[in-house]
Image (cartoon, helix red, strand yellow):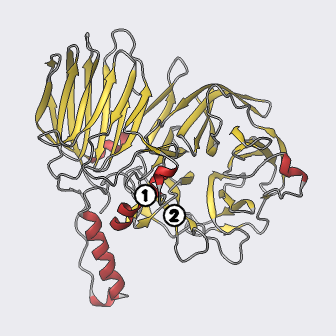
Amino acid sequence: MERKSKINSTKNISNNEIVYHELIKHSRQLRSRFFIDQHRPAYHFVIPEGLAMSFDPNGLIFWKGRYHMFYIFQDPNLPRDGNCWGHVSSIDLVHWVHHPTALVATSESPEEEIWSGAGLINKDGVPTLVYYGYDVGICIATSVDDELNHWIKSPHNPIIPKPQKESPEYEVYNIHDPHVWLEGETYYLITGWKNVSNDKYSTKYLFKSNDLVNWKYIHPFYVPNPEWIDLDEDCSCPDFFQIGDRYMLLFVSHTRGTQYYLGLYGNETFYPEEHGRMNWPGGPCFAPETWLDDHGRRIMIAWACEQRLRKEHEACGWAGVMTIPRMLSLADDGSLRIGPVEELKKLRYNYRNYNTMRVSSGSDIRLQGIRGDQMELFLEILPEDTEEFGLKVRCSPDDEEQTVIVYSNNTKILYIDTSRSSLSHMVMNPFPYPYASFLVDPLESSKDIRLQKAPFKLYSGESLKLHVFIDHSIVEVYANERQCLTQRIYPTRNDSQEVVIFSRNGNITVKSFEVWDLYAINL
């Protein structure tokens, strides 16, 4: 589908305004190349250029009416992996303005690289970034300009040094991705990733401070439950906050991706009561982070890892996509609700809808007039007596390519089947390690899982409400605001644009079906 935008073309640039002519020419060539790339998302935030691994969102701050997002990218001119923090901001979570690179390791700073971290407004009202400085410990930086374009690293860095083998702290806690918050007049910080005593099971270690410089270690922040997590899982990219009358620890494990705990918080301790996942084997959802905005909304975004093999995305010249922003909230029963933010509606155009239709057992109904690779779909389906039903998207006319979204009434599973999403042999849905496609030989560490399955149970008499976002190589599926699946897909055929509704072993009634095309933001 042709990418459309509401933004007019740029004005002609006079000769005296053209500086570095060759750079401008090559920049335009790169922009044109990306614009025609059939796999580059159009309304998701995408790295401006280059390959990002990692591409974690970090330091999310709502400041003076703008949503500021920092993200890891790699500068090949720097030592090691060259991890830095890029910086963008938005007034609407849809259109993004690029700022100068915020954090870079320099010869004047102790760290070799900038790894993951968090952001907050300190007691003095100053935006502050807290991050893991590779191999040295936790560091901070502050900004005093309204646009947050200039960041000054603290001369006290690292404020929490990484324990060395000869130090007594080495057997007490470890240092990794930090998260920090202000509680009354006290700053609290959690860091670490696994139990330091046996390097097993995810955990975090709690510190506190009155000034963000001098920190006191308290104790382990929570006790991991081996019934919820695997032995090899860690707790990285943490985000801890109150949501409703409960507390949430949102995090990622390197082996299984995005997940969370909901529970109680008191006496400087978190007590998890339940555990949930936002990524399942074969899925790409990684490194979540949230904003709290001026309306009290808790808004999450995450990295959707590339699932083309390294040679393929290197040839394309880019890799790095975020999910759409998602609002997190609690239902009356205390369970998690998740859905797309309202601001995305401003991208809608070309509305179509279908009235009530009945789909009989074994039928596939190809919807006339509904086709595309840059769309939003909303449908409500009454299951009746069927065992399995769903939707095919990015479907070719002969079904050679198709991505299948399925709900199983028997097993109470919502899943995405990507076994025929692409004719390319350069695609892999890795598990464990959602980011494994970046490795030279990902099959050494991961399997290729083409069914991403998430638990989801409809209540008695409840309809399935599917909210689906399709954006070239990424699909996001929201179900009744209680479940969400994210998947990367790479159809090769230009005609893989069709939408099909199907039912197996029973009938369904489609009560409503609404469709919008969505404008591009990545120009």
Work out which residue is located at the far bottom of the displayed protein and give it: 16
Left or right, residue 220 beside residue 129: right
* Foreground pick, 418 / 259: 418
Work out which residue is located at the far front of the displayed protein and give it: 444
Q: Is residue 514 above or below residue 66?
A: above
The amino acid pointed to by label 1 is Gly
Name the residue at 23% across, 63% down: 36
Name the residue at 52% across, 71% down: 75
Name the residue at 31% across, 40% down: 469
The quarter holding residue 233 reads top right
Name the residue at 28% across, 47% down: 347
The amino acid pointed to by label 2 is Phe
Q: Is residue 107 above or below residue 381?
A: below
The kind of secondary structure element at disc 2 is strand
Q: Position of residue 277 (x, y in %)?
A: 52, 33
CA separation in Å, label 2 and label 1: 9 Å
Circle 1 packing at 10 Å, graded few (<14), some (14-19), many (20+), is: many
Q: Is residue 63 visible?
A: no
Which residue lies under the disc numbered 1?
320
Which residue lies under the disc numbered 2?
73
Marking on residue 419: none
Q: Is residue 230 visible?
A: yes
